[in-house]
Image (cartoon, helix red, strand yellow):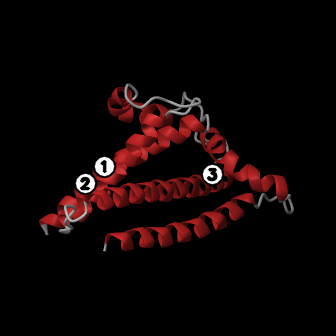
Amino acid sequence: MSNQILIFLVDTILGLLSLALLLRFYFQLLRVPYYNSVSQFLIAVTDFIVRPARRFIPGWAGIDLSTLVLAWLLECIIIASMYMVQGYDFEINIVTSLGVMGLLGIVEIIKTTLYIVLIMIIMQAVLSWVNPHSPLAPLLESFTRPFLAVFRKRIPPVANVDLSPLFVLILIQVLLMVVAGVNKEIIAMLF
């Protein structure tokens, strides 16, 4: 019982911080408008860990790698702590265990990224029907534009209905299935 509570607390607290770091990274990468309440919130929540990390993890080509690396490290900590609580002995082969935890962290980052894009596209579609002039509309548009643009170039609107979100959502579902398969293969390396 106490192990389940511990796993829940670690996963929730570190998972939310990792999500905030990932969102901050993608907002910067995709040039989402800086002066909106969501961006300001993400910066306020994650600045305590990002600013010191920038001293050790430099950016590259205008990309803030420190936030991405921190999100990955948090995911690795979550995964390692879950295995430790479940009784996995890392001392059997520490190098393999650390490598597997790192790979599982990358898989979790990819999976979370896919879910972020999925949720943003759904939110944008619903918001365009309900309240297209919402303050969130420009944020969602600038975030989803690169993903939708790939399909918008190739698939014209049908009766003035943009079908590109549908194709992106289908592609994300397929990618999530692939990621789940890769995750199982990596976990099989541990046992």
- Residue density around tag 2, few if under 14, some if 14–19, many if 20 or more, within 10 Å: some
How many numbered discs, if any? 3
Q: CA distance from mark 3 to mark 2?
A: 31 Å
For mark 2, give the secondary structure.
helix
Proximity of marks 2 and 1: CB atoms separated by less than 8 Å: yes
> What residue type is disc 1 on?
Leu
Q: Nearer the viewer, residue 105 or 161?
A: 105
- Location of mark 1 (residue): 14
Q: Is residue 145 left or right of residue 155?
A: left
Quarter of the picture containing the N terminus is: bottom left
Image coordinates for residue 157, horizontal then vertical, percent: 84, 58
Q: Is residue 155 left or right of residue 147?
A: right
Mark seen at residue 10? 2
> What residue type is disc 2 on?
Val
Q: Is residue 53 left or right of residue 24?
A: left
- Residue density around tag 1, few if under 14, some if 14–19, many if 20 or more, within 10 Å: some
Q: Nearer the viewer, residue 60 or 119?
A: 60
For mark 1, give the secondary structure.
helix
* 144 vs 159: above or below: above
* 42 vs 108: above or below: above
Proximity of marks 3 and 2: CB atoms separated by less than 8 Å: no
Mark seen at residue 124? 3
* 17 vs 105: above or below: above
